[in-house]
């Protein structure tokens, strides 16, 4: 069975009708995603990564779906297959899911001031809604934003020697080694001073009142707009407890950068939109005044972490991110390392 036949078969399992067309959607960095058109409408079909625990995905879906539904906030509404399951398993053991295509506008940077404010307010609304979940989500990616984990994985890969040597870049490795210390908290083989500095800074970035339920991947391409406002979110597989400031920093990264250039003024507008948003009941008192001081460090950490992940991917034989064009991963590394909050 070729790919076209496989996709048609899976579509029929969910919809009980033949697709008119199946097109690849390029937005996803990880899951293979397709736009399916049938006589009854449009749908999105995704092949999930095998490492994603299905029980956690379903647990989290059952937590956020009722809340979003109650507030009229748009989200992917999973269909069940002919066996009544949310995930259809094909003959190779891959899991697939399907949901109706959500009509909405996806914006692209650079954004206007009004759009930046709307992004910030939209993210604040997402955090407000997630604060209403009846339980705590089970992290599908427990290591998300754990820079200690990613750095140790990178060092282990280098020591193993089982890498793609032609992709190595000494200047990148030097920058990673130079910048990583302040963001580490538990590395056994770094100096005592670096560990103490790293612990202090990490605690400063993520104080207790900064931890809440977050989207986990609140980038611009996951925000759905109508009439200038955020009305929904896509890719909710990363919902988990985490740092609100780091989520805001990651949202700024996706909205205020283009080809390695960072617009600091745009970032300030987005952060202002977030401060104007509905956050009063989400975070402990005092977060609003403290967030501004934490944001620059969180922003720098997010960029270093993502550069580290892309570089590890570039030199590893096991891939996580898609290579959009030859050399894409290394290009992203250099862009990310070239940006800091100044």
Image (cartoon, rainbow, N blue to C red):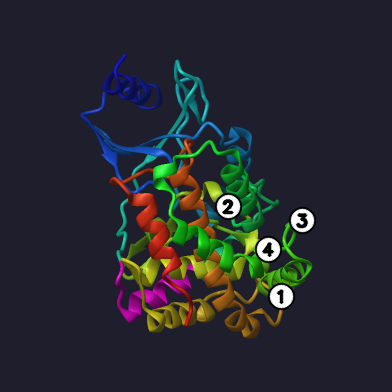
At numbered mark 4, what does the secondary structure look like: helix, strand or loop?
loop
Label disc, if present, on residue 284 of the rendered structure: 1
Res. 63 in view: no
Residue 4: image x %, image y %? 27, 23
Quadrant location, the N terminus = top left
Q: To which residue does mark 3 refer?
A: 188
Residue indicated by mark 4:
184
Which numbered disc, 3 or 1, marks the residue closer to the eye? 3
In the image, what residue occupies the spot 37% across and 23% down?
10
What secondary structure is the magenta-colored segment mainly?
helix
Single out the mark in the foreground, 2 or 4.
Answer: 4
> Which residue in the structure is indicated by mark 2?
239
Please give the name of the residue rendered at 52% of the width and 56% of the height, measured from the top-left corner: 308
Task: Return the x and y of residue 164 as percentages of the image width and height.
Answer: 44, 40
Q: Which of marks 3 and 1 is nearer the N terminus?
A: 3
Q: How far apart are marks 3 and 4 (CA)?
A: 10 Å
Left or right relative to 100: residue 90? right
Task: Name the residue rendered at 61%, 43% in the picture.
Answer: 159
For the record, the magenta segment spans: 109-123
Residue drawn at (66%, 73%), measured in percent from left and top?
205
Measure the C-alpha gap from mark 2 to mark 3.
Answer: 30 Å
How many angstroms separate mark 2 from mark 4 (CA)?
A: 24 Å
Which dot, 3 or 4, sits closer to the camera? Answer: 3
Nearer the observer, 130 or 33: 33
User: Neighbour class for label 4 at 10 Å: few (<14), some, many (≥20)?
Assistant: many
Between disc 1 and disc 4, whose residue precedes? 4
Pointer 3 with pointer 4, Cβ within 8 A = no
């Amino acid at each position: 069975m070729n790919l076209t036949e496989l996709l048609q078969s899976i579509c029929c399992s969910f919809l009980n009708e033949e697709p008119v067309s199946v097109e690849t959607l390029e937005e996803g960095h990880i899951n293979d995603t397709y736009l399916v058109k049938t006589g009854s409408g449009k749908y999105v079909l995704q092949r999930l990564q095998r490492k994603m625990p299905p029980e956690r995905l379903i647990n989290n879906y059952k937590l956020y779906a009722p809340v979003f539904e109650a507030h009229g906030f748009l989200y992917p509404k999973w269909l069940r297959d002919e066996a009544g399951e949310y995930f259809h398993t094909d003959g190779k053991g891959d899991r697939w899911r399907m949901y109706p295509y959500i009509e909405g506008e996806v914006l692209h940077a650079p954004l206007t001031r009004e759009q930046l404010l709307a992004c910030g307010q939209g993210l604040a609304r997402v955090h407000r809604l997630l604060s209403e979940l009846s339980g705590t989500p089970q992290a599908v990616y427990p290591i998300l934003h754990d820079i200690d984990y990613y750095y140790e994985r990178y060092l282990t890969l280098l020591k193993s020697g089982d890498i793609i040597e032609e992709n190595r870049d000494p200047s990148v490795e030097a920058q990673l080694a130079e910048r990583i210390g302040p963001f580490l908290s538990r590395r056994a083989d770094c100096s005592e001073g670096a560990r103490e500095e790293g612990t202090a800074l990490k605690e400063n970035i993520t104080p207790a009142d900064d931890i809440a339920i977050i989207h986990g991947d609140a980038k611009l391409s996951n925000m759905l707009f109508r009439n200038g406002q955020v009305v929904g979110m896509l890719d909710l597989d990363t919902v988990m407890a985490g740092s609100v400031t780091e989520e805001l920093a990651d949202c700024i990264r996706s909205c205020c950068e283009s080809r390695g250039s960072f617009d600091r003024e745009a970032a300030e507008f987005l952060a202002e939109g977030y401060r104007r948003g509905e956050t009063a009941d989400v975070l402990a008192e005092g977060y609003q005044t403290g967030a501004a001081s934490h944001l620059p460090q969180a922003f720098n950490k997010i960029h270093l972490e993502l550069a580290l992940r892309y570089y590890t991917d570039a030199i590893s034989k096991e891939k996580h991110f898609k290579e959009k064009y030859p050399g894409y991963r290394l290009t992203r590394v250099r862009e990310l390392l070239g940006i800091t909050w100044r």
